[in-house]
Amino acid sequence: MTYRSKELGLFSGKGSSSRRAIYKGCGYDDGDLSKPLIGIVNTANDAGLGHVHLDRLAARVRAGILQAGGTPFEFGTIATCGAVPIGMPHFRYELVIRDVIASSVEIMTGVQLLDGLVLLASCDSIIPGVLMGGIRADVPCIVLTGGPQEVCKSGGRSVVMSELDQLVFGADYASDEAREKIRYLEDHVCPGPGACSLMGTANTMQILMEGLGMALPGSSTVPAVYAEKERFATQTGRRIVELVKEGVKPKDILTRETLLNGVILTMALAGSTNAVLHLLSFAREVGVGLTLDDFDKLSETIPVISRVIPTGKATVIDLYNAGGVPAVLGEMRDFLHQECLTVSGHTIGEIAALRRSSDHDTLTTVDAPVFKNGGIAVMKGNITPNGAICRTTTISEKIRRFAGPARVFNSDEEAHHAVVTGDIKSGDVVVIRYEGPRGAPGMREMMMTTDALVGIGMGQEVFVLTDGRFSGFTEGAAIGHISPEAAVGGVIAVVEDGDIIEIDIPGRTVNLDLPEEVIAARLAKWKLPLKRERGILGIYAKSALQAHLGAMIDDRVTEEEQVRREF
């Protein structure tokens, strides 16, 4: 099949001399320009744990592209580490950058007229961002993720970053023991490059790239420092050239059935709740239907088969040793849409047929699951008519039906202060609002409050409700993504201290115990506390979709009035 640069006569048609001159000035010759032009999106930088090693992998990708007869063009994007600004106003950028990254990949691919893309990325919103950009670019793409980091061992057990966070935000700093432990973990809990080795957002998204068929089978859980990851990098470089020649694009792979497989895997692994936002956004990018109703329906039947932290005590390294994503697919085979295509050329069913779990302490079977259903639950009620998201596997059975008085805060910082000063009591429902897509803006993760509650031993005694998000690290009783959010006049905006909130996890409901007329009267008096923002946060505050739609910037233009400008 003819690829785009050939079809357009990029280096052979009218005006091509100037284009050839530009690329020859960059060191390419006529032979280079006659081959498929492959972009390597490399999110490497020196300030992110998941990205610091990616240049090494990029070199291997480049080698694979050259071996297969392509010409590589490497370029970068921004890539942040979401853990750095926790507890600071700058934490608002973590979801916003997804849209910025997607736009940068779209622009670079479009302007340079590249024929295909290797999306080399790691961590939370960065992986979804590069994939969304690749979808928009509408060229063949393949994903290579950076992999999980090695694991710190302390006291004969694996210790991950979430344990340090819980100490930092919940511990008594006057305690010599606490300070000593914090210092030890500070020096040892991140032993090297890669995504923090628990089922946080980073590893959930790495795994989903493979589960959605966008990465080579077996590649996503290989530890960042293993030689096997470098071999996969070379194979990825070779395979993208083949995909370009075959004309296979993301929209050929990311069907509704494929995205439903993504939902199934998220449920089965008790993955990060952030995966819900990203899967909804992928669906929107490729133009297929996917809603919270799909998540809700599947949550009733999909068993949880993973004991990776925070669901259990295993790490992603353990999951790799148990067989990685192919083993997960094998164990979940009967639930999956097996006909779905992958960038490998094989179907999901063919990959699933090859492997099963070799370690049932880490990855169980569907016949002996960790939980029978509901790794992630969709909650609805008068406080969240569009739906909210709950990671059920971190909530104890004794509080899955819960009612308590609301303690209302307008930021994570306010709520965290109340926790650490002893102002929150067992049985309370902590409500954190104005942290949604438009309210924060940026839909912040409520890590400080939840980590503090777990750190002081109240993670199973207090519920946290928010229109913001939670980290994949989050443990304890929490419901997020409340929609509509406070900033657009959702019911959460008018909850008052002392109001009783009723939560029923098995029944999938969360309600404010007030008559409808009282709620309506409060809403009639409500006014938005305006946050004056500029730049990308200002754009997000004006245009972000609600959480149940993926919380991305709304780029639709449906009416002439939307593009008119008044002078």
Image (cartoon, rainbow, N blue to C red):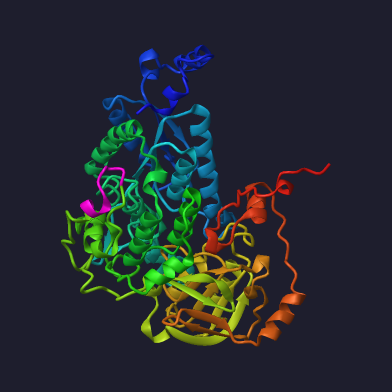
Please provide percent x and percent y for residue 336: 29, 61
- Within the magenta stretch, is there residue 313? no
| Res 100 seen here | yes
Segment colored magenta: 342-351
* Residue 179, percent from left and from top: 42, 66
Nearer to me, 11 or 529: 11
In the current view of this chain or complex, which residue is farthest to the right?
567
User: For residue 297, what is the image quadrant?
Assistant: bottom left
Q: Main secondary structure of the magenta part?
A: loop
Quarter of the C terminus within the rendering = top right
Q: Residue at x 61, y 67 (%)?
A: 485
Q: Where is 356 relative to 420, above or below? A: above
The quadrant of the rendering that contains the N terminus is top left
50 horizontally vs 412: left or right: left
Is residue 345 covered in magenta?
A: yes
User: Is 198 on the left-hand or right-hand side of 465?
Assistant: left
Residue 309 visible? The answer is: no
- Residue 37 image position (x, y, % from top left): 40, 26
Quarter of image, res 300:
bottom left
